Amino acid sequence: MMRLAGAFILVFTALLLFSATAVAATVVKLDLPQLVEHSDVIVVAQVTGTEASVEDDGRVYTTVSFETHDTIAGKPPAEFTMRHIGGRAGDVATHAPGIPGFTPKERVLLFLGHSGDRFALTGLAQGKFRVATGPDGETDFVIPQIRGQHLVPPDKAPPPRDGADLPDPEDFDPDSHEKVFGQAHSLESFRHQVERLLKADQGDQ
């Protein structure tokens, strides 16, 4: 699980900084097996708060606090934080292409790697899926959050914008980036695919 995770985080960070003046961030395109392989922690969590501040370099950085609700892989603490460039502090705002936003009380499924003693999203926004309840009021869905990224190779399938009127999706092909990020998936089916990949990964070790 941990192999190459640090290298991927560094690559993504470098690509983000290189693209900071562009409209969109350029990141390596990942499918679900790659997300799983390069993540140390996979968790369903809820955002408990955000705090933005202007740092010495004049840019805004945001610290997001989470409460762990369900652990799929790894050993996340009951509460953890993640810090990223971007956000608004007073009259100062920094836009960071490729970094997804977080709002208090938002439920999310996160693919995380360790960056030093902190967590970082695997694949930038590709590592965040918003969790929303479907029209039936019972079924939870995971919704990709990859808008604002230029994927290599380019991805032409935009994800849905919100959790309303979500379909009841069938099982999807986890090896297809378009199938993973081009539509919402039920949390149950998505988790099943992740657990299947984790089991296969453990069998190869």
Image (cartoon, helix red, strand yellow):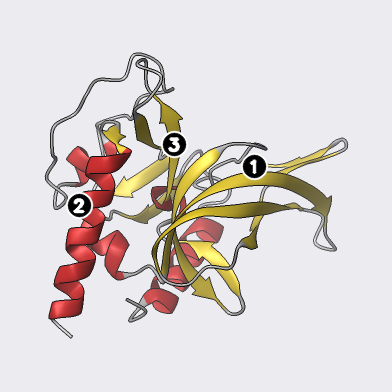
The outermost residue toward the front is: 138
**Badge 1 amino acid:** His
Q: Which residue is mark 1?
A: 95
Q: CA distance from mark 2 to mark 3?
A: 16 Å
Left or right of residue 99, residue 142 in this image: left
Considering the numbered disc 1 on the image, is that residue within a helix, a strand or a loop?
A: loop
Residue 87: x percent and y percent? 71, 43
Sequence order check: which comes first, mark 1 or mark 3? 1
Q: Please identify the quadrant where the C terminus is shown.
A: bottom left
Q: Residues within 10 Å of mark 2 (few under 14, many from 20)?
A: some
- Classify 67 as above or below 116: above
Is residue 173 found left or right of 10 in the rendered image? Answer: left
> Based on the displayed image, in which of its 4 quarters is residue 165 positioned?
top left
Q: Amino acid at mark 3?
A: Val
Q: Which residue is mark 3?
A: 131
Residue 74 location, x and y as percent? Answer: 42, 71
Cα–Cα span, label 2 and label 1: 33 Å
Measure the C-alpha gap from mark 1 to mark 3: 24 Å
Residue 115 can be seen, yes or no? yes
Which badge, 2 or 1, is on the more N-terminal residue?
1
Q: Secondary structure at mark 2?
A: helix
Residue wearing tag 2: 193
